[in-house]
Each structure stands twice: as C-alpha cells, then as structure tokens.
Amino acid sequence: MLTLYRRVKEGNGKWRAEKIREGRAIRTSTLVGPFFVRPFVNGVQKRHPLHSTTFAEARQEADEIEKLYEAQSRGLTVNELTAMQNSNRLPLRTVVDTYLEQKKNKAKKTREQYSLTLNEFIEGLGRIKFLDEINVAALRKYKDFLTAKGFAGKTIDTRINIVNFLLKKNGVEARLPKDEMPVVETEAAVPYSDDELKKLFGEMDDEEAIRYKFFLGTACRDKEVTYAAWADINFDKKTYTVRGKPDEGFTVKNHESRTIPIPDTLAAVLKARRKSNPSARWIFVNEAGVPDNHFLRKLKRIALRASANCGQCRTNVTKGKYTTKKQVEVSCATDPVCEHIYLHRFRKTCATRWQEAGVPIRTIQHYLGHKNLETTALYLGVSDSEKVRDKINEAFGD
C-alpha cells in the first residue's frame, strides 16, 4: 500500500511535505489536500500528485495508482492485473524476468542473447500476456513475427529453441511441430587452404602470428583463447587444458574442461614466450595488461592487408565521426569485411588436420568439446584431393 503524503502550509507561508499516519484510533477524516504519493518507478522513487481533496478519496486514488504502476511493470493493463491476481495467472513479463535472473551466472554473450530473444518473444506475441495463453498458435505467431523481420532460418531456429527452454522450465508443453520449424542450411566445413594460411601468416608480425597459431594448433574457441592462462599449459606433456575462470565470469561451453595436445612447434614458441611474457597469469594480453580479445576484427584487418579476401562480399558499415556518421556499402576488396575470413575456420582447419593425421573421430570430438558426434562431423572438412592422390591411386591399383 502506497504511503500518502500531503502538503501543509506553515505559518511563514512556506509549504512542507507531511507523511500521513494511518491505522486504528488515528483520525484521518478531517484531513484535506493537496495529497501526493511517492511510488517507485524503475527503482527510482517519484512524486505523483493526487487530484483528491479528501483523505478517503486520496486513499482510493492512491490504490488505483499503485495498481497502474504494478501493471505497467508487468506489461499488463489494470484489468489484466486484476484478473491475474484473482486467478493466480502468471504474466509472461514476470516469467521472463525470473528466467533471466536465473541465467545471471551465464556468460555475458549468452545472457544478452537470451534477453534479446525473450523480450522479442513478448513483443512478437502482441496481446498475449500470460503464460497459460502460450500454445502452438502463439508459437506460430512468434515464428511469423521473426520471418517478417527478415531473419535467416538458422536465427529463427535458435530463437525458437531459446523460447522452448523457457517454456520447458515453466512446465509448458507447447512446441512447434518439427515440419514447421525453419529450414537450417548446414554449413559445410571449409578449412583454410595452405595458400590462404601462407598469405595470412606472411602478413602477421610475431605477436599476431603466435596468437593465430594458437587458434590453429588447439582448435579453441574465441573466449577459450582470450582466457588461456599459463597454468593451463603442461609443457612436459605439451597439452593445453581448457578450463573456466570463475573470477573472470568465463565458463567452458557445456561446463566440461578438456585437455588438448598441442604441436611441438607451438609448444616451443609458447615456452620461449613464457620466459619473457609480462603477464604472470595470461598468455595473451593487450596494452592494458588484461586478457586480449577482438581477435576476429584483427584477423579481418590482417586478411585485407594480405590480399586474402575474396573481393566479392558486400555489406553496409558505419563510417565517419559524430555528425558525419553514415551507412555506406563497402566491398571486402577495400574493407575488412570478408565473410570467408573468420576464427572458426582455424577450428575447422585444425579438426581436419587431426582427421587427416588419423586421429579417431571420437578423440577429435573430445578435443573440440562437442557433446554430439554429428556436430564434430560438420567440422571435418573434405581433404584436398592432391593430398590424398596417392591413396586414391593405391585404391585403384595405379
């Protein structure tokens, strides 16, 4: 219940705010306004004047205002809030906020993706406000909403699955039938060719080279390289163990640490780096001495310098500063925007090399940190025909 206040004029002609006490044996019927309340809106207490002139009217008006603010905070109308309170229905806004709070220990990127998707889910459902209204028809409406925004099948599939996680957590069984789920084009594994790697590494300085050789030699993900620590390297066994860093908010995907063998050449370079590296903990740090990142952006710049871009990709980027900012279309022939240059290709290249070297696919699955063998299969590129020519000739008796 909101506390009522009133403005009282003192003998010197100045006005002051007075908190009104309520309760048994406290007479309020003779009080007159102006009255006001101070509800919390988005965590901030704000002054809200009342139009009532008597205390009884002010109390009733304050109760209605309290309902209004509570309804707004839940994304409801006052009537919907009243109906919900009378029937114990759960508003979607409350369900989503509770679910996101439960995900606060997830990686920042994951939290942002869940928040974006679930807030968009509420937006896409329009007048549907309560959890018990979610059915297959509502999910179709959300899918149509995403399609109308022009999202690709893979994006729509990902967002619907996030919604499914929310629904499962809250005991809602409604799901889109499999034949209505968007078509997701499976991306073929395209490892970097020897020529592409030669171009890229030929343009790198020593610091850049060791960072991307680490990507290539370990098949690690972006953040797994960012938070690579010296304590994770076993120089005797020449291995790197991917493990979480709770103090930095970094968790390993699937929450499973794994140990990866690293090439002798990479182990030797890292050992030499250890002796001169300024960081006592991290392998790769930036100018501020903290774990480095933005590896993708830097790789794309290197690729442009190395003339490793395809020259065909086109996209819109923001150029200029302050009032001169504008969207312009650019080509990867002139800007670092080539779609074929990305960090995961190092991961695919490493996995393919392991395969060509005869490493069992189950072992590769462990090195990559995959739960499903099918996912690992997508990472294994088709071998260069020249590299397997001897085996092909042998198979045909040539």
Image: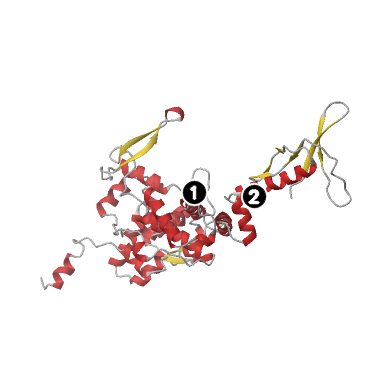
Farthest top residue in view? 12
Q: Amino acid at mark 2?
A: Glu
N-terminal of the two: label 1 or label 2?
2
Badge number at residue 285 = 1
- Residue 148 image position (x, y, % from top left): 37, 49
Label 2: few (<14), some or many (≥20) within 10 Å? some
Residue 375 visible in the picture: no
Q: Residue at x 62, y 61 (%)?
A: 87
- Residue 179 image position (x, y, % from top left): 34, 64
- Residue 297 image position (x, y, % from top left): 40, 45
- Residue 256 image position (x, y, % from top left): 48, 67
Q: Amino acid at mark 1?
A: Val
Element marked by disc 2 = helix
Of 142 and 353, nearer the camera is 142
Badge number at residue 70 = 2
Of 81 and 109, nearer the camera is 81
Of 371 and 112, nearer the camera is 112
Q: Which image quadrant is residue 304 in?
A: top left
